[in-house]
Image (tube, rainbow, N blue to C red):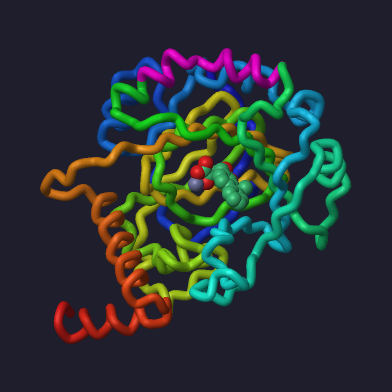
Amino acid sequence: MCEEKQWNSTQLRRYDLELEQIPRLYYTDPKVDELISLNKPVVITGSNIIKTAKANWTPEYLEQNIGNAGHTVMLSKTHKFKYFDESKVLNKNNPHGIEFTPPTRKTKMKIGEFMRKLREWKPGNDRLYLQQPLNNTIGDLLVRDFINFDWEYINNKQSKHNWGPLTSNLILISQEGNVTPCHYDEQQNFFGQAYGYKRCILFPPSDFECLYPHPVYHPHDRQSMVDFDKPDYTRFPRFKFAKGYETVVEPGDVLYIPIYWWHHIESLMRGGPTISVNFWYKVGPTSLEYPLKDHQKVSITRNVEKMLLEVLQDPKEVGPLLRSMVLGRYT
Ligand SMILES: CC1(C)c2ccccc2-c2ccc(C[C@@H](CC(=O)O)C(=O)C(=O)O)cc21
Ligand SMILES: [Zn+2]
């Protein structure tokens, strides 16, 4: 039967990007393993991976069952929640840190206060984004739901594709319209959508040259410098060649976000709050087989930048040295 779509394209933000669709495959389809083994994104549909979350996790249920410990809530003056690494910001005990104005603020909130602030939100108020690691502070019903995920399926994928250990599951409660700007993570990710709809735009690691990541020592390490809402084509001319893939995940879907793949994720505008739960896997040390994979090249550039910072000490000297090495010689 054809389910009527629960959203429409006016709820998606508009970007100057050419986007192909990420394949949506039934979880028993052998092509799922084919794509995962190629480190390519795929939406796994119809599975029981997060069936209990799809069935139970509404904002009201989480308000009742997420626990009373208080949670990390990011606050932002805009719809964008650009991650930054606090340890790389200049502060009294970090003389090599970077002068930096954080675009978001971290605070602690009880779930009741968070939900109230969502309900009472007005334009001009800070936007909110709650994140809660699945740990021993969450309520028993959530623990039961988590235990009843389809771990046989999940663990089978983890071992078949030689992923490392599961490092964490993050529960995310986002306000409608929030955007997590384009970045990559150094972990494999099963991104489960439990409630509401999220639009995901992904780019392969080979689009490195088109997405202009901040320097590794910058607090916005791993994040793209390009503002998708207003791209600066003078500073970032190759952004127009980025080739993205997109999908809108719905409750029960699990999107495989391959390690080092760029992803921009937005909660649909006027779609109400969204709830996601991700599964991050560290990968073991991979031997370098030739020809190198694209993500391995990204990892090499990271090592070069880290090594240069280590020997030069001052971040401001890394650019000039790289330029003197490359310009006129490798160009
Ligand atoms: C933006 C936010 C709340 C944040 C702020 C400060 C520190 C960490 C994080 C963090 C980490 C993961 C996500 C989930 C997801 C993006 C999305 O679903 O919005 C994603 O990128 C992934 O699963 O890899 C979201 C966030
Ligand atoms: Zn991410």
- Identity of the residue drawn at 73% across and 41% down: 71
Left or right of residue 115, residue 43 in this image: left
Q: Relative to 157, does residue 242 appear above or below in the rendering?
A: below
The residue segment tinted magenta is: 141-156
Q: What's the magenta bit mostly, secondary-structure-wise?
A: helix
Q: Relative to 330, does residue 102 appear above or below in the rendering?
A: above
Residue 200 x, y percent position in the rendering: 51, 44
Left or right of residue 209, residue 137 in this image: right
Residue 143 x, y percent position in the rendering: 65, 19
**Quarter of the view holding residue 251:** top right
**Quarter of the view holding residue 281:** top left
Whether residue 191 is visible here, answered yes or no, is no
The one of 216 and 61 positioned closer to us in this rendering = 216
Q: Residue furthest front?
A: 93
Q: Is residue 157 magenta?
A: no
Whether residue 313 is visible here, answered yes or no, is yes
- Identity of the residue drawn at 44% across and 58% down: 222
